[in-house]
Amino acid sequence: MKILDCTFRDGGYYTQWDFDAEMLTQYCQYINALPIDYIEIGYRNPPVEGNYFGAFYFLDAETIASVKKACPKKQIAVMLDVKYIADTSILQTLLSPVKDNIDLIRLTVNVQQFGNLEAIVQSIIQHDIKIALNVMYISKVEIPTSFYELLNKYADHVKYFYLVDSYGNITPSELKNLIQSAKSQTEVPLGFHGHNNMELALANSIVAMENGVSVIDTTVLGMGRGAGNLKLELLLAYLMSKKQWEVDVYALNNLVDLYKKLHEQYNWGSNLAYIVSGAVNAPQKTVMEYLSTNRYSIQEIIRGLLTQASPSTLNTVEISNTSNYQEALIIGGGKTIQSSLQQIKKYVHQQNPLLVICSIKYLDELKDILHKAVLCISGSQLDLLAKQHPDKIDLFQKILVPSNNSKIPVMIPKSLEQKLSTFDTYNYTDADEDSPFLLSMSFAAKFVSSKTIKLIGFDGYTSANKRMLNKVNQKIINFFHEKDFEIHSLTRTSYYNIVPQSIYAKTLHL
């Protein structure tokens, strides 16, 4: 039985495949001392636009060669994201420079939609690199005969046929039956890649080993998409205890310590939301997105996973009679608000803009001007407003929520049921986006006559675990910028497509 560690590849879902060079160096040092056969260090993908992904999503030939040199006794694996290989001619460019330093290429397979999988396999074979086919969603889909026909056709070149528990919810008995079924239809060696939503990754891996699976996937501290994967250190502890494997526990301890800081930063691993997502076959990606926006409580995420219907019917009215303004001012929740409170209040009283607030973070400090403001909120902010600021609910001119309510059902506190109004977002690209910032921009865009929108307290997010929020906000800014709105920031910001100005200059009287 062999072990494949895919910490850099699967763990990249949290870091966006950014890892520093020193971490890779230390990883190689410690992994060399451990009984690991394969290390999968990331993706070898062609250039793609539209999202930021780091170096380990676009592995270059130099990095792959350096890992091969640093880990001469390990076999090097990379993954290809097949959705980017519409034209297999790109594989010549991708594989030729690295074929001497790669021992295994892994491909994810959706057996309900093969696409050009066979053409990709044929192209990889031409480069004399072994292949692993990773079949996803094994707890939900039945593997068709057509896949086994394809697998057996290229059996001499497919090193492993992986069973991937994408939802982290397959049970040991179900996995055992699936392994036996697979072994009756192919002689290609099997692999198992477990997710840990329902804390079954170790139990399933033990069953896989007992039933003849040839390779098991792990990650350090379980670092991986969503609820994470089988912990390398846990599997090695089991193998030491039950199978008398020799393990350098000092190297293992150093390897675990290497990832502790990242774990504190990103806090991966199973929680109740991931457990429920496993129970209902919901993708890891969905829960990760819900959590990363910091917009929903665990309770709301669970409710969203369990039902598609809203648990509360809003008694709301559409807004149709708001006067036009020369400019709009949107106040966010950045720390720059604290240092410029007096200037903000002065500006509001002097300029009388269409005032929109899209965060409840500084309502106490802004209490003097709330009577001039429209509040735009969504998700768990509704519950927090009712619990933390009940005395301020009646101060606002309006409290707006998106007309689609939310990506997931949100319970409306009784104290807010008669206070809310709905508003449609501005023909935005993502129809179900329920960002309070998007709602604020849409409201301002409709009622400001000069197409000038000013922002305060949109500092930008610098912490890695709030990178998704930064990305969402920047996308919204770009959208309105392309619609010819002029967006100014009166406080310090890291967002672009914004005209920088100063609240101090705007309120200065010489």
Image: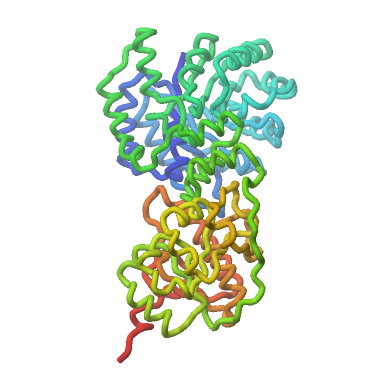
Residue 225 x, y percent position in the rendering: 49, 36
* Residue for point 69% across, 31% down: 118
Q: How many marks?
A: 0
> Foreground residue, 255 or 242?
242
The answer to whether one can see residue 480 in this image is yes
Which residue is the extreme one toward the right? 146
> Foreground residue, 98 or 34?
34
Going by the image, does 49 lie left or right of 271? Answer: right
Residue 277 x, y percent position in the rendering: 56, 34
Going by the image, does 49 lie left or right of 498? Answer: right
Going by the image, does 129 lie left or right of 263? Answer: right
Q: For the C terminus, which image quadrant?
A: bottom left
> Foreground residue, 220 or 279?
279
> Foreground residue, 27 or 407?
407
Residue 229 x, y percent position in the rendering: 46, 28
Q: Taking 3 as reference, is 399 above or below it?
A: below
Residue 485 x, y percent position in the rendering: 56, 75
The answer to whether one can see residue 101 in this image is no
